[in-house]
Every structure is written in C-alpha cells, then in structure tokens.
Image (spheres, grey):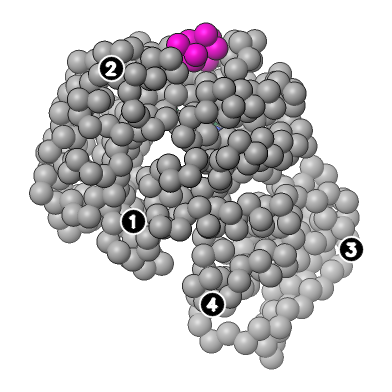
Amino acid sequence: MLISDCAFVDNELLDVVRLFENQPRSISHSFSYTEGVFINRFVVDDEEFIYEERGQVCDEILFKRLERRYAKLALYEILAQKTGEKMPWGALTGIRPTKLAYREKEEGKPFEPLFEKMHVSPENTALIRRVLTAQEGIYEKGKGGVDLFVSLPFCPSKCAYCSFITAPIDKTRGFLPAYLEGLKKELDSLQGAIKNLRSIYIGGGTPFALSTEELRTVLEAVAPLYDGVAEYTVEAGRPDVFTKEKLDLLKAFGVTRICINPQTFDDATLVRIGRKHTTEQTLKAFEMVQDYDFSVNLDLIAGLQGEDKETFRKGVEFAAKTLSPDNITVHCLSLKAGAKYKEEGGFDGYGKDVEEMVLASREILGAAGYEPYYCYRQKYQSGNCENVGWTKAGKACVYNVDVMEETADNIAVGANAVSKKVRGDRIERYATPKDIKTYLEKVDEIVKKRAEFFKL
Ligand SMILES: C[S@@+](CC[C@H](N)C(=O)[O-])C[C@H]1O[C@@H](n2cnc3c(N)ncnc32)[C@H](O)[C@@H]1O
Ligand code: SF4
C-alpha cells in the first residue's frame, strides 16, 4: 500500500499513516534533493502532491534527519487535509518528544518553532516546556551517571492489556530459585564496578509477587552495590500483594521509593481487565505505607475497557486529592502484541475519548500542585496520546528521567533487561534473553558479555 524510493523512511511513513483512522488505499513516495531543496513527491489515492523545503546541509546525519522529518511532515499534512483528522502530537511519531526539544535547545534554538512546524498542539508544546522545567537539576547529560535496573518478570496474574514479558508466578515459580541465583551472579559481578550511581530500580513485573524471603535474596544481592545515597525504587506493584513484612524489609535495605499501582479505582473495570485486586486493597496498601517515609508513585491508565471519561476523571481526582502520593503516572492504553486484548481481538481502545481523559488529568493534577516531569509515547497508543509522570515539587524520580532522556548508562540485570551505554548522542544496547529459561542457560555468558560491553 506504501511504496517509497527511499527505503529507510518507509517505516516512519507507515507510522504517520497509522495515526489516522481513515487511511488511504495507496501511497507512493519519491524523494530528491536539488540545489538546497528537499523535494518530497507523494501520490495518494491517485492524487499528486509536491512538497519543498529549503535547507543547506553538509552533515550526513543531519541530512538524513531532515530527509525523514520533511517526508513525514509532508505526508502528515496530506492526510490531515484529506481526512480532516488532527493529531495531538501532529507529525511527531517518535517516542521521546522531549529529546527533540533538548536537541533544539542544544543547538541554541527554542524548541517551540519546530513543534509548531510539526503541528504539535499548543497544549502539548506547553506540556513539554513544563517537563523540561521540572527536569532542571535532575537532567544530567554527559556526566557519566549510572542507573541500575533489576528485572523481576513475575506477576500474581496477567492483566488483559499488558504486553510485558511477564507470566503469572504460579506458572513460573519453578524457575524462581535458579532465577534468584542468576541475579546474584550478575549483581556480584558488578561489585566495585559502578561509579557515579544515580539510582536503583527493581521492577518488572511485580516485585511484590515474590515472597518476603525471595525478595530478601534480591535485596541482599543488590546491597553491596548501594551507596546509601542514590534513589532506590522497588516497583512493589499490585495492591493485592502488599504486606507489612515486605515493607519492613524494603525499609531495612534503604529503599526510598515504591509504587502502588491501582490503574483504576473502579472495581468493575478491575474485573474486566483481569487485575484480580479490588479498590479496597489499594486503599489498604496506601494505609499500610503511611507508617513509612517512602516516596510513593501511583500508576493509572486512561482508556481501559469499559471505563468512561467520568469514571477516569473521578479516579484521577481521588488519586490527586485524597491519596496524594508524591508521584502519579498517567498512562494511555497501548495495545501491543502479547496483550490478551490484542491476541483475542475484541477491544481496540477508545481513541478520541482518551485524548479528552488526558486533558482532564492535566487539569486536575496541575490544580492539585503536580508538575509533569517526564513524558513518552508508545506505539498503538489510544488517541495517539502519551504517558506522563507527574510529581510534587522536589520529588521527581531520577530513574525515570534518566531512562526517558537516555542521559545515563543503564546497567540492567535479569531476563529481558536492556543495558544501555550512552556516549554523547550515540546509544548502544545490550539485551538479555526475554524468556526466563534461555536467560538461565546463558547467565555466565551474560556476565562476560556485559563486562565487555561496559568495559568493567
Ligand atoms: C512495567 S508495568 C509494572 C507495574 C506493576 N506490575 C503493576 O501492574 O502494578 C508499569 C506500568 O505500565 C502501565 N502499563 C502496562 N501495560 C500497559 C498498556 N498496555 N498500556 C498502557 N499502560 C500500561 C501500567 O500502568 C503499569 O503499572
Ligand atoms: S500490568 Fe503489571 S501486574 Fe499486570 S501483567 Fe503487566 S506487569 Fe504484571
């Protein structure tokens, strides 16, 4: 359906097409560059369009970037005009709009004119401005910072919308003793090798799906790497697996931040999404953590099956005004391969409603004193929206900022863990196997390869 003479932009042009509900039958594209002019010629459903953008560029990387940008912009403008549809992020399809904004700033320019050219809505441009402001003092590029991620891909049960590589723990518990040994082997190999630690994040998965003793094994293995100063998060996770013993354990090992993730405060929705916990359990978990001084994050999702705008709005209000944790993360449903919904068909997201839910959440959270401090987008996200982390003043999570902006090395251990080495604007990745069994077979090789990768 899409033919381009410029193969490396194919996928990105398809990303633009995917934004639209009404899609054309056929698109052909050709590109040329003549006397300082980028020329994109499209034929969409037999109608011809020619777009020209002036730009003298000698640098090859920059040339390719502009080639992609102008092709996407042209196609977006054609489809917006033909369908009458408008997207909140305009022609931007990348997952990190903030990175684009930072790049413009690094080149000494304000980012807003580029966002305007790409048809990003004024509300989203303002959102990114606020995110950049909230990241001041945390955003640290080129200073050799390191974050440590520990992957625990175990959950009490699998939620219908989730495509993470994680399985119900009753099916994988047999692997757990070997998995914990594998983690220990990896973590032991890092002793003395991490300098400039900015944060530790134990996530997955649902770390609290483990028993207290299993969790203790993980925390003991991490302990020699922790300097007692860096931010230390355990994404405890689902309210149904919270216990006082596990919280005591986290406290004893110096953990500073935890997550309690209701996703919604509507019990009927919880049943529909197969989450197998209740709002009462969420409230109990919040009550339980009152005795500790953890910084708390709460995750919500806009666009869950059967949840209308008003139910979502009330949930955000309850989270912000009644529970009032330090961080609230508002995700927009993104259905990818691996999610039950996707595999079984049926529910396909709510589109426009989600855009309205997101705008309502911004209003409520802003009024309650939260600031947006990171923002990223995913493929197939309902309403072509985004995920935003909101924070009370001074409580932004360093790990989330580093991961989203890719400004620090990430040493990631466990199965399905992607380590990243950041060298200027170049990022190299080293990924471990996704499946637990293969991971267990390869732990020794992983330890060796990671050491080579980071030159430890
Ligand atoms: C890595 S998950 C782990 C959290 C933890 N297991 C839990 O569910 O409580 C982090 C967050 O991503 C969000 N999430 C997961 N799947 C999603 C999806 N398909 N669309 C949007 N957000 C999603 C949820 O808000 C979830 O809390
Ligand atoms: S949302 Fe969380 S608890 Fe549910 S399956 Fe995904 S990782 Fe597990």
Which element is circle 3 on?
strand
Q: Residue at x 43, y 14 (%)?
A: 287
The residue wearing badge 2 is 246
Which element is circle 4 on?
loop
Is any atom of residue 412 visible in this view? Answer: no
Q: Is residue 111 magenta?
A: no
Location of residue 56 in the rendering, given as x and y in whole percent from the top left corner: 62, 87
The residue wearing badge 3 is 47
Q: Is residue 25 left or right of residue 342?
A: right
Say if 372 sits above or below 210 in the image: below
Q: CA distance from mark 2 to mark 4?
A: 48 Å
The residue wearing badge 4 is 108
Location of residue 396 in the rendering, given as x and y in whole percent from the top left corner: 44, 44
Is disc 1 in contact with disc 2, using a CB cutoff of under 8 Å?
no
Report the span colored magenta: 275-284
Amino acid on which the number 4 mark rests in the picture: Gly
Counting residues from the start of the chain, the first of labels 2 and 4 encountered is: 4
Amino acid on which the number 2 mark rests in the picture: Lys
